Structures are given as structure tokens and as C-alpha cells.
Amino acid sequence: MAHFDLPTVITYSGLMACVMGLILLFLEKSYPAYVKGVSLWATGALIASLAVFSRVWLRSFVPDSVAIGAQNVCLMSTAVFFLGGVCKFFEQPLSRRQIAVLIGVAAVAMAVFASYHGGAVHRRLFARIYLIALYGSLVWVIRRQPQTLATRLMAALVGTLVVLLTARMVVGYLDPSGDGVDSHEWLQTVYAVGFSSTDVLIPIVAILLITEKVRSAMETLAMRDSLTGVLTRRALFELGESEFAGCRRRGAKLSAMMLDLDHFKEINDTYGHHVGDQVIKDFAERAQNILRRPFLMGRYGGEEFVVLLPDVSFAEVATVAERIRDARSPDPDLPEYHVSIGIATLQPDTESVSALIQKADQGLYRAKQLGRNRVEMAMA
């Protein structure tokens, strides 16, 4: 079996991590609205290249213990920045002070262990325990997220790194001469392949995580109305058909409400479209606050909204509709407005969610015919 030179392999993997870090930095600039914390990942990957620099170049100018200590600080800083980036990415951010304290502890410890004879073993032991703690925390953060392909791969890779670090810590402590590596060629091979693979694969999987998050954000934008945050008409019908089929299968109740703001054109003509948009947004928010979950609410078009309420009795639906009609905006700067509401319930002959919504629209038409600002049930 070929003899793997661990420092050389780590050098190449560090340079590869540096390249991946630059790619991550580019991705964050490309998707600043959806991706947070990637600059910390990129910083960690770039610092990994400094570990190579300290290992190879500093030894020509400073004692070996100082060069190795600097390398360890870089490796621990890489882990700190990557942990900070992942926490921010998943919206559980570490503060700058916490990151600075973690790096400061690593630097102080390396300086202390380099200052007395026989400190090399303690330095290695501390560095590996520190890295195990940081990467273990990273696994814990990732495992708490919704499990996707990318999160599972990332947890597996970082978990593998924790296992490798633990093995090297134990072997290095039991056989301090040569750090337990020089006397065991097979360990040299395992470490070289294991550490270099994780150094390169972790940034690659990080790119996959970013791709998943951007795709999810784009899908959410496609399903949500940009002004009100409720479902778009297309998303309402897609999810509504699924809910309709489920209620049919279970023999459960399903009701639809069609809501329309009365005389909305007059509001636009009198106060302007900007105020009209604020009225629509205000109404959508207060309606959602009143509605009983689970429900689906979508913007049907203009100032019209549709609400689907599964597993709710007609009496409850009527009560909720009256509460929405009676509610007043808490914003004193908005003009007073009223709403007409039509209701329809699922019948044995109802063929689709579209047919149910059309029935609710008939109820809305009756409400407008009878004077507006009222709730009416669709005629059978």
C-alpha cells in the first residue's frame, strides 16, 4: 500500500476547501435575500488554507511548536466559523462575541501549551477535544432541522469527522511518539483519506444545502401572494383539491367562504392605489387572525379572497364569517371598509373544490344583492 504523507494530503484538501469557500461566498452574494451565514463558512474555508501556510511556511522561521500551535488555532477557528455559519443559516445565530470568545480560547490555550516543556501532548489533546466539541455541536444543530438529503449528508459527514478526531485523539494519547501515526502506516492512510475527504465534501454539501434553501424560497414565493402573504389563486386550487379529496375520503365536512371588500373601487379612486393595497393587506391579516386553523386562505383576484375550512361545522363557519365581517381595522390611518361574505358547504353532488368555490360565489352575489356588508349562504 502506498504511504500517504498526511501533511501533503491536508495541504491539497486545504487548498480545495479554499476554492469551495470562494464559491460559497459568491453564492451568498447571488442570493442575499435567502441565504445567511455563508460568508462565515467561506471565512472558515479560507482559514483552512492558513493552516496549510502555518504548517509549511512558518516552520522555516519559528520553532516547530509555534508553527503547529498556529496551525491548530487555524483549524479550530475553521470549526468555529463553520459552526457560526450553519447556526446563522438555520436562523439560530451565534453572536460575534461568542465567535470571538471561542477563537480567543483556542489561541490562548495554544500559547499556554507551547510555553512549557512536554506541553505537546496536552496541546494535541486540547485541540482535538475542542474540535470534537465544536463539530459535535454542529451535528446537534443540523439534526434539529427538517431532514432533507442535504441535512442528512451534512450530519453524516460532520459525524464522520467527529469519529476521526476522536480516534486520533485516543491513539495520539496512547502512543505520543509520532502522534500515533508514524508508527502505524494504516492509520496514516485512514487519517489522510478521511480528513481530506471531509474537508472537501463538507463545503460541497454546504452548496447543496444552499441550493435546497433557495429552491424552497422560490417555491414559497410562487405559492404566496406578494402583497398579503396568503396563497395565490393557483396554489389555493392545487392545495384545495387535495383537501377536497381528503374530506371526501374521510366523509368530513368542508366549507368555502368567498370574501369581497365592498366598494373597493371607491377607496382606490378616493385615496389612491397605495392606500387600497394597504387596505387589502390589513384585511388579509385580520381575517387570518380570526380564522380557526386548519384553513386555506388565498387571494382569488383583486380584493376577493377564498377561505377553505375543513372539519368545521356550518354553525362555526357562520360564526367565524360574522366575526370577520364585524372586525374593524386597528389602523386609524386607513379608511373604514366593509366586507360581504358568501358561504357554501360540501354536498354529496359537489364534484370539485372549484364547484364548491362557485357555490360560495353565489352566496357572495346574494350578499351584495341584499345590500352588502353581510354574510349569506349559497342557495341549494
Image: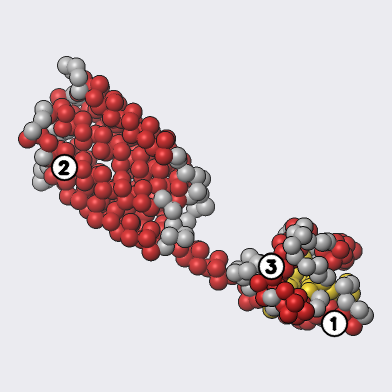
How many residues crowd mark 2 within 10 Å: few (<14), some (14–19), many (20+)? some
Q: Quadrant of the N terminus?
A: top left
Are the residues at dot 3 and dot 1 in contact (C-beta closer than 8 Å)?
no
- The percent coordinates of residue 67 (x first, y second) are 16, 32
Q: Which residue is mark 3?
A: 278
The quadrant where residue 224 appears:
bottom right
Residue 344 in view (yes/no): no
* Residue at 69%, 78% in the rendered image: 302
N-terminal label among 3 and 1: 3
Q: Which amino acid type corresponds to the residue marked 2 in the rendered image?
A: Phe
**Residue 67, relative to residue 152: is it above or below?**
above
Label 2 element class:
helix
The quadrant where residue 274 appears:
bottom right
Q: Which residue is mark 2?
A: 53
The quadrant where residue 335 appears:
bottom right
**Residue 349, relative to residue 156: is it above or below?**
below
Q: Mark 3 or 2, which is nearer the eye?
A: 3
- The percent coordinates of residue 207 (x first, y second) are 36, 58
Residue 128 in view (yes/no): yes
Q: Which amino acid type corresponds to the residue marked 1 in the rendered image?
A: Tyr
Q: CA distance from mark 3 to mark 1?
A: 25 Å
Q: Mark 3 or 1, which is nearer the eye?
A: 3
Q: Which amino acid type corresponds to the residue marked 3 in the rendered image?
A: Gln
* Residue at 47%, 56% in the rendered image: 148
Label 3 element class:
helix
Q: Quadrant of the C terminus?
A: bottom right
Q: Which mark is residue 99?
A: none
